[in-house]
Amino acid sequence: MNIDELAEVPDLDRRFGLLLLLVSLGEFVPTGATAVDYSRVNFCRVSDESDDFELMRSKSIRHTRDALIAATARFEQCALVTNEHRLAKRSRERGIELLTSAELLSLFQPAVSVLQSA
């Protein structure tokens, strides 16, 4: 999920929590592609894989943000975290590693257990 998408979460408490989590988990990276009216200058990469990007967004403007996130995972060679079935299927077809949010959180569970027992 990108920061612009999180900034649009209507529930203020949820938005605040998600933004804090995103900032604490990692660093900002430019998206792996560029989409007019979605990408910000200096926060995106110009890509010559436009056909692949169109397939990722199912040739529908509604799926542009999802396609940008998948393109970023592919460019960064990291797992894409999603619970969205269409995006998961399209990403898997392109060789992108996938994790559900539950799988991602389970990776942190051992560290949480250690902290709680200390």
Image: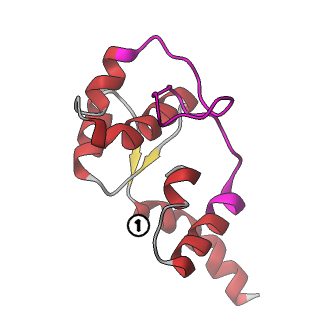
**Residue at the extreme front:** 37
- Measuring from the top left, give residue 110's x and y in whole percent: 59, 72
**Residue at the extreme right:** 118
Number of numbered discs on residues: 1
Q: Which residue is mark 1?
A: 102
- Measuring from the top left, give residue 46's x and y in whole percent: 55, 18
Residue at (29, 44) in percent of width and height: 88
Q: Is residue 106 left or right of residue 22?
A: left
**In which image quadrant can residue 89 be found?**
top left
Above or below: residue 58 compared with residue 53? below
Q: Which residues are magenta?
A: 22-50
- Measuring from the top left, give residue 96's x and y in whole percent: 39, 34
Between residues 33 and 98, which one lies in front from this camera angle? Answer: 33
**In which image quadrant can residue 66 be found?**
top left
Above or below: residue 47 compared with residue 73? above
Callout 1: SS: helix
